[in-house]
Image: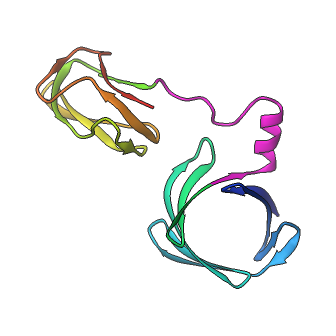
Amino acid sequence: MQKLKVVVGKQQHEVILEGSSVWLNGQPAACDVITLGNRRLHLLLDGRSLTCELLRYDAAGKRMELLVNNKPVQATIRSPLDELLEQMGMQAGTTRREPFIRAPMPGLVLDVLVQAGQAVEPGTSLLILEAMKMENSIKAHEAATVKSVQVKKGDAVEKNQVLMELE
């Protein structure tokens, strides 16, 4: 049995998943899910048809942005453990890395692949740095927005030099 607190927009719901049964706010709910492809699914919940697409997911904060029937929706999913950790002041996953992307070694900026204001996901290539005759793709460690870019194509950089700032 898995018990979750799901907040969708301003509405809070208790969801219990037990085997193939779903309980919503203490009542049994008829639920059928069909995967439509990458980050998309169709949900039939108590006769209501919902097409859902995941736009962005923050695993640390357990927050997501969805399109539900083509309308933007914010949602969070929290387990009893998440609730307990919060009560104890120990929110899981709240440590955030330094907001600056720094050069791991001296080199030459071959290409800047993002610009200020752009949203990036974990693993997104931010820029290409040539060092010791090798091309190195510098990637985002987490979902963020590029706040500023301090270098441009052709710049020589030193080790630990700030290349860009994320927020």
**Direction from residue 83 to residue 131 in the image, left or right:** left
The structure residue drawn at horizontal position 38% and vertical position 44%, both measured from the top left corner, is 120
Looking at the picture, does residue 97 appear above or below residue 64? above
Is residue 79 covered in magenta?
yes
Looking at the picture, does residue 37 appear above or below residue 64? below
Q: Quadrant of residue 135?
A: top left
Query: Picture coordinates of residue 164 (x, y %)?
Result: 32, 26
**Direction from residue 87 to residue 118 in the image, left or right:** left
Q: How is the image coloured?
A: rainbow
Query: Picture coordinates of residue 119 (x, y %)?
Result: 39, 44
Query: Picture coordinates of residue 90 (x, y %)?
Result: 75, 30
Q: Residue furthest right?
A: 26
Q: Quadrant of residue 149?
A: top left
- What segment is highlighted magenta in the picture? 75-98
Looking at the picture, does residue 52 appear above or below residue 118? below
Query: Picture coordinates of residue 38 (x, y %)?
Result: 44, 68
The structure residue drawn at horizontal position 63% and vertical position 32%, both measured from the top left corner, is 94
| Nearer to me, 119 or 142 | 119
Looking at the picture, does residue 155 appear above or below residue 44? above
Q: Quadrant of residue 130?
A: top left
Counting every numbered tag in the picture gives 0
Screen quadrant of the C terminus: top left
Screen quadrant of the N terminus: bottom right
Is residue 59 covered in magenta?
no
**Direction from residue 20 to residue 138 in the image, left or right:** left
The structure residue drawn at horizontal position 48% and vertical position 65%, both measured from the top left corner, is 39
